[in-house]
Amino acid sequence: MLDCRNAAFHRFVVVLLVELLALAPLRVAAQSQRPPSPPQPKEVFESLRATLERPYLELFEAAPSLEYSPAQIERMRRYLDEARQYCVREFRARLSTYQKDRQRLQADLKRRTASLEDPERRDLHCKIQNLRILESQAQMLVEHAIPVAYENKKAKLELIEKWPQELERIKQEIASGTYHQRRFGDVKDIGIRELVPGQERDIKDGQEAVRQMKMTGLLPPELDHPAIKKYVNDVAQKIARHSDLRVPLNLTLLNSKEINAFALPGGFLFIQRGLLEAVEDEAQLAGVIAHEIAHVTGRHGNKLMKRATIASIIYQAAQVAAVILTGGAATLGTYYALQYGFYGLGLVLSLDLLGVSREFELEADQLGVQYAWNAGYDPSGFIRFFDKMATREGYVNGASWFRTHPPFFARMVHTKREMMFLPEKPGLVRDTEEFRRMKEELAKVTAQAAEEEKNKPSLLTPVQGCPAPEKPEFKPGDPIEKICPLPSS
């Protein structure tokens, strides 16, 4: 009798364990969907969170006097990782819902196509189109905006943690004079020194790349405004004269709202309208231009093209276009192509497509700061623009600004370090009246472009006149928590 009871009990335990194991994934899934809780007392958490919203330049000044413990920093680091994962899951779930709803409506449209009246058909078209827009935005948030936002927060946390010790090392290098021995430390010889021989041999490759880009329609239309072109060209040529450039600088402005600039081998520099809209002063514009010129003087494009010919770059761009035009799987790149029309593919021919190495980006950061400083600009412009991009508009319109780049902390510290090593120079320029006048003219161009886009069919919105879907929007200055709310205490 006892054996039977034991056997029955064992069967009961086995059944119970099986049920518990079956329920375990559900419990884990339920817990994983909960937002992370603040990891420490409210006053510490809120103070540290507010600190992470401060600009990099402020943090460089403040970090040595901040008194957060290693344990508090580590807890915040774990919280940021959990918050990022939570937000990505939230929008990935939304993406899945949008996709399923769209597929259901498309199946319904196909099944009833013969019997639908025009008003009902149009209503279905608008619903499907709006779900595509929501899909694109959710994908952009999952693949780009949320990761960038939290990578930026973690970089600032790392700055708070590590900058005081790094600052002491920099001071020691300055005091001992060893900073002169750094790579490209001969800043007083800019223009005379030769970084990488053979810049002139890159002109032919650059010309061929530009020719093929135009032939295949991969460039946005040029921004044809004489005053704006003259102003930007004057700034670019001034920096070129104070750099290590050995080839003529050929500037082209592109009438596209993407925030981007890229340089092809041989001195071919492209700046898109969105970047001119995003910069807040002339020093920021100079910082970006100087960074791109540094890619040319370092012959980074030439080195990368050894891995991929121009023809293969065009082929890859054509493949992306084929995916879009045939309704294939959406990616971050296709989001921009769909949002801005086929011209959005211009970004794929920047060096990002070839996989800019960390070494090349850090090198361009260092040389770019030197060139801006040598041309008489406040070299902090590059850091301030980077900060703006990583915390505001960069979430959405600046995808290519952050793709395949080194960790934010490394870039900011590397750039600040170089700024501290540069000799004092009085009268460094941050802003000018000419910049303000350019912005006034640019506002007119932007307004005209927005008006033209309103009634212009695009790949994402072929059906005109549909009510726009309600979707979360970023406004300048909004933190990522605005679009993905988390507990505050």
Image: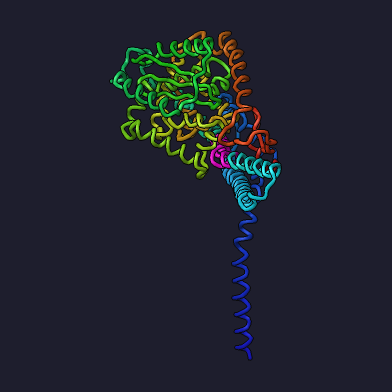
Picture coordinates of residue 458 (x, y %)?
57, 32
Say which of 20 and 321 sits in front. Answer: 321
Asked whether 148 falls inside the magenta stretch, the response is yes
State which region is magenta. Answer: 137-154
Which quadrant of the structure image shows residue 450?
top right
Say which of 346 and 173 sits in front. Answer: 346
Picture coordinates of residue 241 (x, y %)?
40, 11
Color style of the picture? rainbow
Left or right of 206 on screen, residue 452: right
Left or right of 205 on screen, residue 484: right
Asked whether 176 falls inside the magenta stretch, the response is no
Mark yes or no: residue 93 visible.
Answer: no
Picture coordinates of residue 410 (x, y %)?
47, 32
Say which of 264 and 312 sits in front. Answer: 312
Mark yes or no: residue 465 visible.
Answer: yes
Residue at x-position 40% and y-position 37%: 316
Left or right of 202 on screen, residue 83: right
The quadrant of the picture occupied by the C terminus is top right
Picture coordinates of residue 425 (x, y %)?
47, 10
